[in-house]
Image: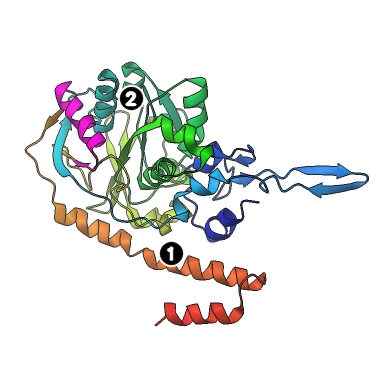
Amino acid sequence: MVYRLKKDVWYVGRCCECGACISTCSKNILRSPRDGDHPELEVREKRIGSSHIVVDTCFFCEKPCEDSCPRLREWEKGQILHTVTVTSRLPDTSIVNALLIASIRRKLVDGAVTWDIDRETFKPIPKIVTREEEILTTSGYQYLWHPILEVLNDAIYKKGLKKIAVVGPPCIAQAVKAIRTSNNNKLKVYKNSIYLMIGVFCEGAYTQQLVQEIVDRFDINPYELNRLIMDIKNKVLRIVMQEGLMKGIPLPEIRRYMKQGCARCTDFTAECADISVGTIGLEEKGTMVIVRTPLGERSLKYAFMEKTLKPSETSISLEEIQKLVIDKERRKRAQEIDSLTSLMLESLLGKKSRDEVREKLKIAWR
């Protein structure tokens, strides 16, 4: 059952919990994790006489879960058509929401899968939006994690969306690209429905334990929180309260709450997206937008035409962005170690000879 996912992703801590495999599972046996670091596999049994036999439900499956998994591919560097610094004209100042609203107005897309927050608990939740007023009430990506792609089926089958925009960090963009470039027939409906990918810069995503740390440290309630900002330049988590006050925690003090799969991610600027958005600090007068595809170009053009965005004279240092890109690329060594771990597991199971594993270990550590 889901052998490659288990061996090469789950067992070596590489899962990014994007939710793609959950939505695309044609057998409907993958579930969102409750406490773990990867999806849960439902075990189905069949009774024959007095015996119970575990059924291999994946035996005749085309395995769309594997073809949609971003961790089972090697990703090349994404293209850049051009970059621009912009500010939002919306009341919530969100660049992503400005792009979404303009794209819906111009019928580039008919809806989006984006991020929101439960205000009582400050837990991240996925949100399917089709109208401007819905977009304006979303909180956006807060660096807190939820397998957002698990709602793709709701967007397609319940909402009836034909041209969907997806918002998310690099791993979500990679999962979307895996789906859009796959030839697996089971992924065809998703491939045809996901139209625009808006990526957001991400240095790492965090579990809900981070919220509990904030609540305990500052003796506040979750509903008093308004927004989390990763000030990567100054290595501080900025915590914006509902009344506008700002608190801070040094990033090294919260690293223990980062998702395990983030340690294997080598993408900072969502290179697989159509258009990438983000900052590295508190650039209040401008946010960088990286246009990567003609579709992303159209989305940005419509935002200028609809006046939801405007160009900014403030420039963001590409050198600083490049430093962070290089820092993330250093995590490739962890991926090499994962590959070797998988080989050793196969050797123990008798699927790979120990001599073959020994030879690859020699090459890796030269």
**In the depicted structure, whether residue 135 falls above or below residue 349:** above
Please provide percent x and percent y for residue 73: 43, 55
Give me the disc on residue 335. 1
In the image: residue 103, left or right of residue 225: left
For numbered disc 1, what is the local secondary structure?
helix
Residue 300 part of the magenta-drawn span: yes
Kindly report the secondary structure that dominates the magenta region of the rendered protein.
helix
Q: Residue 315, located in which quarter of the rendered image?
A: top left
Please provide percent x and percent y for residue 276: 26, 41
- Mark 2 surroundings within 10 Å by alpha-carbon count, few (fewer than 14), some (14 through 19), many (20 or more): many
Which mark is first along the chain, 2 or 1?
Answer: 2
- Would residue 112 be seen by someone viewing this image from the given angle? yes
Give me the disc on residue 109. 2
Are the residues tagged 1 and 2 within 8 Å (C-beta)? no
Residue 203 part of the magenta-drawn span: no
Please provide percent x and percent y for residue 142: 36, 38
Q: Foreground residue, 304 or 359?
A: 359
At x 37% / y 43%, what residue is drawn? 173
Give the spatial CA distance, label 1 vs label 2.
35 Å
Q: Which residues are magenta?
A: 289-308
- Indicate the quadrant containing the C terminus: top left, top right, bottom left or bottom right: bottom left
**In the depicted structure, whether residue 54 falls above or below residue 309:** below
At x 75% / y 47%, what residue is drawn? 55
- The amino acid at mark 2 is Val
- The amino acid at mark 1 is Gln
Q: Foreground residue, 309 or 254?
A: 309
